[in-house]
Amino acid sequence: MLWPLLLATALADEVRIEIATAQANPEVRLEVRTTWLGEDRTLVLRDDGSSPGDVPADGLYVGAWTGDPVRVLPIRILATGGALSEAEVYAGLERIHQPADRLAYALAFGDNPRAQRVVAPYLVRTLDARESSWVTASLGWAGLLFLYVVWLVGRAFPARRR
């Protein structure tokens, strides 16, 4: 009798769409289309900070749909604006795994812009010099702290000599 439990956990009533680009381009507008239980829906995404939890010009386009629980959604992503005429950058069926699921994509601009499904949208971002110096300093301090702890443990438990 686990079937009702398994089916209930595989439905989603909110689907959050996150599309990340390597470079911020506020002129580009992304449109995500789906059919939610027979109803055609369109979600317009911009990198202008207008969606909740979004920062302007960070290269991350965010939006969400809500409705009756679903298991599978057909997704089409269209890009327009800037130097682009309307181009379909992604089309596919997405399986929904959680009650409030998130679909993340990485979008690459160029001659033939394409989006691909990713685990987390932030993995495609590139770091500028200021951000990379913070990362380098953090890793350096973490390594120094690790060596200090190893030295302390070595002093607390000296090796037995014969």
Image (spheres, rainbow, N blue to C red):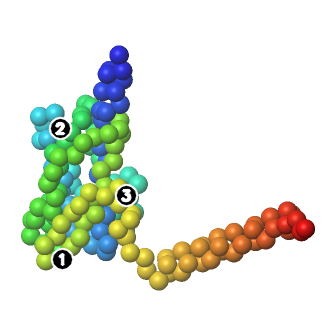
The residue tagged 3 is: 120
Residue 134 or residue 39, whichever sits in front: 134
**Disc 1 residue type (three-letter):** Gly
14 horizontally vs 138: left or right:
left
Residue that extends furthest to the bottom in the rendered view of this protein: 129
Q: Which mark is residue 36?
A: 2
Q: Is residue 41 visible?
A: no
Q: Is residue 43 above or below residue 157?
A: above
Q: Is residue 5 above or below residue 122?
A: above
Residue that extends furthest to the right in the rendered view of this protein: 162
**Disc 2 residue type (three-letter):** Trp
CA–CA distance in space, label 1 to label 3: 22 Å
**Disc 3 residue type (three-letter):** Ala
- Residue 145 point in image, percent of width and height: 71, 70
Please name the residue shown 21% across and 39% down the image. Answer: 72
CA–CA distance in space, label 2 to label 3: 23 Å
Q: Which mark is residue 110?
A: 1
How many residues crowd mark 1 within 10 Å: few (<14), some (14–19), many (20+)?
Answer: few
Quadrant, the N terminus: top left
How many residues crowd mark 2 within 10 Å: few (<14), some (14–19), many (20+)?
Answer: some
67 horizontally vs 123: left or right:
left
Q: Is residue 99 above or below residue 89?
A: above
Which secondary structure lies at badge 2? strand
Please name the residue shown 56% across and 78% down the image. Answer: 136
